[in-house]
Each structure stands twice: as structure tokens, then as C-alpha cells.
Amino acid sequence: MANGFWRNARVRGDNRISLAAFALLALLLLMLSRAQVNVFDRTRAEISDATAPLLTKLEAPFDGFNRWVGNLTGIFNVYSENLRLKDENARLRQWQGAAILLQGRVANYERLLHAVPRRDTSSVLAHVIGRSGRPYLQTMILDAGKAEGVRPGEAVLDARGLIGRILVAGDHTSWVIPLKDLNSRIPVTIAPGNAQAILSGNNTSYPGIETFDPRVQIKPGDVVFTSGDGGLLPPGLPIGTLIVRSNRYRVALFADANSGSDVEVLDFKGIPETQPAPSPADLPSAPLAAAPAQAAPTSSVPAVVDGNE
Amino acid sequence: MDRASIMVGGLFAGIVPFACGVLGAVLANLPVSFTSGLLPPPLFALMPVYFWTLVRPDLMPPWAAFVLGLVQDLLSGMPPGVWAASFIAAYALIDRQRDSFASLSGWAAILGFGVVALVANICAFLLVSFYFLRLPPVTPALGLLVVTVVLYMPAVFVLGGIHRRLVGSARTQF
């Protein structure tokens, strides 16, 4: 009996040490991943590549079941939904006429101003083979990866608007981080007014909006687009409209990440920001004064020289 | 029964709890949903940790709980360390209160698992808040807790069956 007690105490003591060690290790891993966010990405990509054939087979019956469940809930409000769609259709027809008129006018202005034509962006059409809504991370898995030209950071759209960005790209699969996910933060423009803001996911259906200037005038119904800042996403991709929920501005997304089965991955190469060549006034005066006829230095020359050196 | 077959049997019995945890993590993180994404997938990997830490702690050492948490992190897309630390916190609670948890039966046993799952979820919630420097919404985290506890009821019968048939009912002196 006594031996059993001492053995229990010893083993529990050992456990406490190892528990503390493993807790410390977990926290170290967490801090490491905060510094180097893609620690597990390669492994995740390999796992999704390896399981892609299984996921493709599994996805069909689950997709059918989920559609059936979706239809079951939708059947109760089919009448009101029909009325809403008729009303929306009438309004959209009016907007279609206005849009065609404005399109022609913009084309005329661009011709008159000799505007630089927009660069075409190529795209990859991909099928959603998996989707999961976890409390802290919501993802979609696509059946296109690096081999098809998909790279991390690229925009993923459906017919209605932006869904999210590529998080991890494997050889033949990729993970999408939807706009509503907690990890998602993208620069946006709110029209009209051209207000700049950040759309930040909060794991609800309505991501939050953070404007840079608190005095900026925005109102419910304003439309949110990608701003293109940072060169990661192309500007002008439709995202959603502003609404007010719980006394805060939120965005009702156009695209539905839970229902779309085919998406487009945009291959956008932002114009690299070129640093202007330093003028002679920016450079240390002594060497230039000695050799004024020398060619402008390349970017490898430091632009700022510490006066103490 | 010869000595070799006893050793192989013992090794197999030792692997089963850990394998159940890995299988739970894989099942919970399949990117398909029965509920059109309305409910989050449960923490299946935590169930073998709770079950065998109580029943046969020698088969579920701290490193196994840590690795199962890491597998959960890897498959769920979470920053590595979140579920690993949460599983270790849950393990520490079970380890400290093993006698109390082991004496529970019926609904009280489910409640016992609920307390452990709550601790793991609170730990994950706090670590995610720390990682992203903002509070995630509480409702999905509560949904995860409820789904996990509700599904523990059928899962405990499966784990009990696996334990009786594959691991053996002999309790150690822990």
C-alpha cells in the first residue's frame, strides 16, 4: 500500500515535470510560428495533395447531402425569396442600362486620355473538393495547385465576387482562406467616397471594416472593393456592401464561400514598386564631388550613410 | 502463449490509444461537413486522451497528448502549439484530479469530460487571442465545446469497446 502511494507520487511528479516541459515546448512552437508563419505549410500541402483523390470521391455525396439540407431549409421561404428576387431583378435591369452607358463613356475618356490599357490577368478554374468551418480557422481546399499555376496569396473568386486568398499551395491542391476567417485582413476601398479601409475577418458571416481615418464618411449600402494596395490583389474586385450590425459597420459579402463549387484563381502580378534612382543630392557629397562624371550608383549602394562611419 | 506473442500483444495494446487519437484528429479534420458548415467538427482527438488517461495512463503519457495536439494543429490549419498546449492543459487537469474523474459514472462522467473539454477550449481560445492579438467570436468556440461533449456520449461506448477487445481491461496501479 505504502509502496503504491510512493510510486504514484513519484510518477505524478515525473508527469508534472514532463507536462511543464511539453507546455513550454508548445508555447515555444506557437511563438516560432508567429515569427515564421509557414512552419507547417509544406506538410499541410503534402497531406492535402496525398488525400486529394479521396477528398474528390468523398466530396460528391457530402455535397449532395448538404445541397439537400440547404433546399430543405430554403423551401419554407420560397415565396418571399421569389418576391425579393423579382424586385432585385427589376433594379438590376435598371443598373445594367446605366452600366452599359457608363462603360461606353469610360472607354471614350480612356481613348481621349491615351490611358494605359489594363493588364490582363490570367486565371485558373478550380473545383472545391473540401470545406471546413472550424471555430478558429475556416478553409476551402481546391483541386488546383502549383502545377496548375496557383500560388499563395492569389485571389479566389466566384461569379459574384471575391471569396478569399490562397493560403497554402501544394502541387495539385491548395488551401483557401475565406474573407470571413479570423486570419484574413485585406486592404479595401469603399465607394462612393473612395475611403480606404481594412476588411478583417472575424469568423462570422459579416467581416468587420476598419477605416484608417475615423472622420471618413461611410454609410450602409456603400460598396466595398479590393483597393489593390500592396500589389497582392488586383484592385476593383467586388467584395460586398456595408451594413450595420450591433452598432458596428460590417460587410455583407457578395460571394458565398459555403455554397460555390467552382471558383476562379486570379494570377495577378502587381507592378513592382521601383525605387527612384537617387539624385546626386541624396548621395554623400565627397565622392561625388571628386568624381561628378561617374554613372549613377546601383541600388546596392546604401542610400543612407551613417555619419559616424 | 509464448513470450514473443505477449510482447507483440503488449506493443499493439500500447499503440491503440495513440492510434485512436490520430484517427480522431483525421476524422474531425476531414474537409467535409454533415451540417453544411452549421456546426463545427468535434474534438475527437481529445476523447482518447481523456479516456485512456483515466483508464490506462501508462498508455497515454504526456508526450502522446502533446503529439496528438500537434497532429490536431497540423490537420486543422491552426498555428502549431495551440491544441498541443490545450491538450497538455487538459491532461494536467485529468492527472491532478484522476481519482475524482475516475469515480464518476453515467451523466457525471460526461460532465467530467465536459469540464476537461472546457479547459482545453478555454486554453485554445486564449492562445488564439494571444496569437492574433484580438478576441475571436465566442459562439463558434462554444459550438465546438457542445458538439464535442454531445458526441463523447456515443464515442465513449466505442472507446470502451476498443479498450475491452484490443487493449485489455487490466488497470495498472496508477
Image (cartoon, coloured by chain):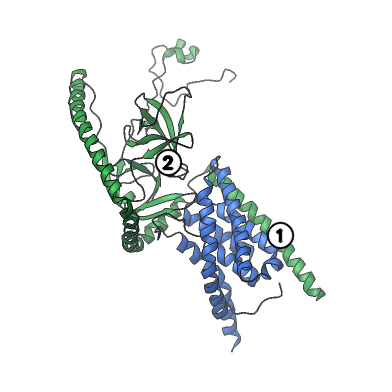
Chain colours: A green, B blue
For disc 1, the chain is: A
Whether residue B56 is visible: no
Residue A121: horizontal and vertical position, in percent? 26, 37
**Where's the N terminus of chain B, which quadrant?**
bottom right
Q: Would you name the residue on which mark 1 appears? A: A16
Among the two numbered marks 1 and 2 on one chain, the one whose residue lies closer to the N terminus = 1
Within the image, what quadrant is residue B111 found in? bottom right
Q: The disc labelled 2 sits on which kind of residue?
A: Tyr
Q: Nearer the viewer, residue B19 or A128?
A: A128
The residue shown at (45%, 50%) is: A41
Of helix, strand and loop, which one carries label 2?
loop
Q: Is residue A217 visible?
A: yes
In the rendered view, would you say B15 is above or below A221?
below
Classify mark 2: residues with Cα within 10 Å, few (<14), some (14-19) or many (20+): many
Chain hosting mark 2 = A
**Looking at the image, residue A256 lies above or below residue B167:** above
Q: Quick one: quadrant of the C terminus of chain B?
A: bottom right
Residue A142 at x, y = what percent? 34, 52
Is the residue under label 2 in contact with that under label 1 (CB below 8 Å)? no
* Residue matched to label 2: A206
Question: Residue A200: which disc?
Answer: none
Q: Would you say A197 lies left or right of A27 here? A: left
Farthest residue toward the right?
A: A2
What kind of residue is marked 1? Arg
Q: CA distance from mark 1 to mark 2?
A: 43 Å
Instruction: Give left or right: position of B77 versus B126.
Output: left
Q: Secondary structure at mark 1?
A: helix
Tell which of B96 and B172 is nearer to you. B96
